[in-house]
Amino acid sequence: MIRMTRFTPAIVLLACFASPALSAEEKLIDMTVVGSGSNFQLQFLNSACSDENAANGCVEVEKGSSSMLTWELDVNGETYWMLTRFQFSADGVNWGSSAFPLNDCAVRNFELEARDQFTGNAASAMITGNGRKVKIMNRNIDSCQTYYRVYAMPKAGGLEIHSDARPMITDAGGAQP
């Protein structure tokens, strides 16, 4: 048996405004795909740092707080591209090299698997929204600075591209595990 419930427009309107799109604990970085021919890359469009002059892609998590970090493709980028993975680097130069493992603080703050410390790949990152978003929880337990890259590929298949800068996530630490 199906039971129908009748809602008044005022109740429906209240429900829409009761849950904001972004909570205060979420940091959002917008991205787009730039380039032509066979030379494309992801570009960051904003910063999640308190410094107004911070480079695009910068993420800062305040002392004692933890945040869901989200990167999202704009509508134009989403049309032909999908996000595929997220990777960290200890120095922003050596990506995926076991000779340059991630700092223990990054492994702990992002709840990475043991192998992630040596590959930099973040198994704890989630691709959502039909490939439009990548999310990772930052526990911000320890003070830490970590470089990152976001990767994408054409929806029709092809070579993987990555973000064009060396942005950094800066954790002030102090959040409860």
Image (cartoon, helix red, strand yellow):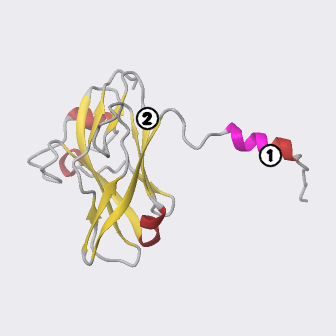
Q: Quadrant of residue 131?
A: bottom left
Label 2 is placed on what type of residue?
Answer: Ser
Residues 162 and 103: in front is: 162
Q: Residue at x 85, y 47 (%)?
A: 9
Q: Residue at x 37, y 46 (%)?
A: 46
Residue range of the region highlighted in magenta in the rendering = 13-18
The picture places residue 100, in percent across and down from the top left corner, at: 11, 45
Side of 80 relative to 168 (left or right): right
Specify the label residue 101 is tagged with: none
Kindly report the distance in space between the C-alpha atoms of the residues bearing marks 2 and 1: 29 Å
The picture places residue 15, in percent across and down from the top left corner, at: 75, 42
Dot 2 alpha-carbon crowd within 10 angstroms: few under 14, some 14 to 19, many 20 or more:
some
Quarter holding the N terminus is bottom right
The vertical placement of 33 against 126, above or below, is: below
Specify the label residue 12 is tagged with: 1
The picture places residue 129, in percent across and down from the top left corner, at: 51, 59
Residue beneath disc 2: 67
Dot 1 alpha-carbon crowd within 10 angstroms: few under 14, some 14 to 19, many 20 or more:
few
Q: Residue at x 36, y 22 (%)?
A: 63
Label 1 is placed on what type of residue?
Answer: Val
The vertical placement of 67 against 175, above or below, is: below
Count of number-bearing discs: 2
Quarter holding the C terminus is top left
The picture places residue 145, in percent across and down from the top left corner, at: 23, 34
Q: Provide the secondary structure element on which disc 1 rests.
A: helix
